[in-house]
Image (cartoon, helix red, strand yellow):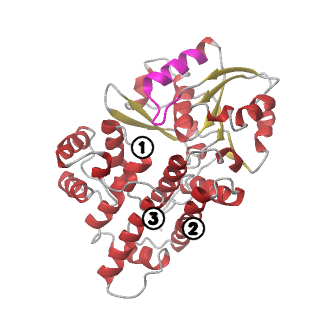
Amino acid sequence: MRNFTFYNPTRLHFGAGQIARLSEEIPPSSRVLITLGGGSIFQNGVWQQVEDALSGHHTSRFAGIEANPQFATLIRGLEQARAAACDFILAVGGGSVIDGSKFIAAALCHPGDPLELLTGTPISAAMPLGCVLTLAATGSESNGKGVVSHAGRQEKLPFASPLLYPRFAILDPRSTFSLPPRQISNGVVEAFVHTLEQYLTYPAGAPLQDRYAEGLLRTLIEEGPKALVTPCNYAVRANLMLCANQAMNGVLGCGVPHDWSTHLIGHELTALYHIDHAQTLAVILPALLNERRAVKQAKLLQYAERVWDFNLGKSEARIDAAINATRDFFQRLGVPTRLGEHGLDAGAIPQILAQLQRHGLTALGEHADLDLEGCERILLKAL
């Protein structure tokens, strides 16, 4: 096991009725910018609970943060927060709303061009942030990372700082009951791939982390399809919400190697072609596992046995079965797993590779040995 330092200061309030605790978490003297996505929270009762909990607070509401939050939209939110002299940010939504709110929190304390925070300037201060989660997927509610899309640059720009951990996160599974099937499926896929990216590398003498990852994966496989059939099943939604949180709150990746290649290639697909982030992961991951099967052989065999119960036959056949089972799982959730299903053919590959090169992503993977030629083979396998 590798050395590691773990830090996570986010307080989680998990379960039904926990939105009422907003009044305890946000000081009564605060001027709160409440950030939102679309209008679903006004139909499912979440907004009413937030409004009731903050009835004694000064609030300013900023709505319209998109999936893959756009820089231009967030600048409008920043301007509104400054005009209202806000000193606390409350994100009510999924990972995109939370990521966008983290950027606003940092930009409020930055004296220069906000774009600098997405292009290498360290974050030195941030307004306090809390969140009410309404979509279980990214784990952004309890980590210090975010991604912002910039349409003019055709880029997804990541940023991170310990200053951006939310002070608290409220996870009420009932707030996810009204999600459409596409968002339910996307959330399950994203949590699943997050987990695999911290697991499917090479043995690192970390059996606890391995078993933890395998438990998350098996739970997602069991519970994910149920959420599509019975979307208001509290127990199912609670398990999915906690899985997504635990996949990206930092614990799972302690002391083990990571491989974020699927995510990084997927980001380019979203930036160029506006494909849902989770759906890019479902396209790239099976192809990447096929391309990298020799490098990942030991963990792929472990994945085949412990997650999919494939423990008979030759090694290559078991690896094939595990990769095919992964693709089939995504398809059972209704998520496409081929570039062609998104209207892309081999003609798109040079543009994707050019973006990877532009961003310096030419040595990916747990061994930093996945070059552009390897990425090209992955993309061809994903057609």
Label 3, label 2: how far apart the Cα atoms are: 10 Å
In the image, 141 versus 218, the foreground residue is 218
Mark before the other along the chain sequence, 2 or 1: 2
Local SS, label 3: helix
The magenta region covers 65-81
Circle 1 SS class = loop
For the residues marked 1 and 3, what is the alpha-carbon distance in whole angstroms?
18 Å
The reply to whether discs 2 and 1 touch (Cβ–Cβ < 8 Å) is no
Tag 2 residue: 222
Please check the rendered image and state whether residue 68 is part of the magenta-colored stretch, yes or no: yes
Q: Which residue is mark 3?
A: 329
Q: Position of residue 365 (x, y in %)?
A: 32, 57
The image quadrant that residue 87 belongs to is top right
Q: Position of residue 198 (x, y in %)?
A: 45, 60
Q: How many marks?
A: 3
Type of secondary structure dominating the magenta stretch: helix
User: Callout 2, which amino acid?
Assistant: Glu
Q: Is residue 251 magenta?
A: no
Residue position for label 1: 276
Instruction: Check the image and name the residue furthest to the front.
Output: 229
> How far across and how far down the image is residue 348, in percent?
21, 43
Tag 1: amino acid: Asp
Rendered residue at 32%/43% (across/down)? 269
